[in-house]
Image (cartoon, grey):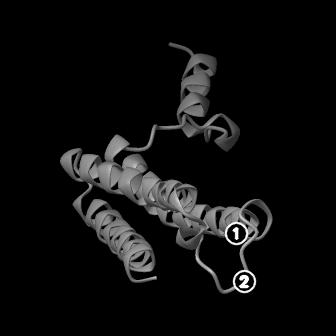
Amino acid sequence: MGVAEGFDDLMAVLTIPSLRHKPSFPEAPGRRLAMWSLLMVAASALAGLIAGMAGTFLQLVVFDLDEQQLLSEAGPWGYVASLCLLAWMVVPPLVGIVLGTRARRMGEPRLGTTGIALNVLIGAYVVMSGIANLVLG
């Protein structure tokens, strides 16, 4: 072994690898599911906004109701429209609950439980207020 070979071996050990080619390790599947569960909270807000705009359009344009009248006052089709809008608003929390449950099973208990709790609260509020508006008027 000559001096040149020993110098090359030393330089190979001392070189710092480039950060540009850093291998990307996939995120844990449980954590990814938990993050998607938490993103369903924002999706619930978006679904509520879309349902509110659609409900206002149905109320004022399609059923020709006054501003303070409910969709249920438009007859059977008003009930159908109300239930469809309620179903639209309940889907994101249900998906968030399922994703949070799967995240807990895959080893992410803290974020999974947080996603489940937030989505249960949102889903319960949407269902209770929707049913109260339909039944109590």
Please state the horizontal and vertical placement of residue 56, each as a whole percent of the image: 71, 70
- Judged from the image, the secondary structure of the residue bearing numbered disc 1 is helix
Question: CB under 8 Å between callouts 2 and 1?
Answer: yes
- Residue at image x 58%, y 29%? 12
Residue type, mark 1 in image = Gln
Please state the horizontal and vertical placement of residue 6, each as a whole percent of the image: 54, 23
- Judged from the image, the secondary structure of the residue bearing numbered disc 2 is loop
Between discs 2 and 1, the one toward the N terminus? 1
- Residue at image x 65%, y 34%? 21
Q: Which residue is mark 2?
A: 67
- Outermost residue on the right side: it is 61
Residue type, mark 2 in image = Glu
Q: Is residue 23 left or right of residue 95?
A: right
Give the label on residue 59, or none: 1
- Residue at image x 61%, y 32%? 11
Quarter of the image where one finds residue 81:
bottom right
Q: Is residue 44 left or right of residue 118?
A: right
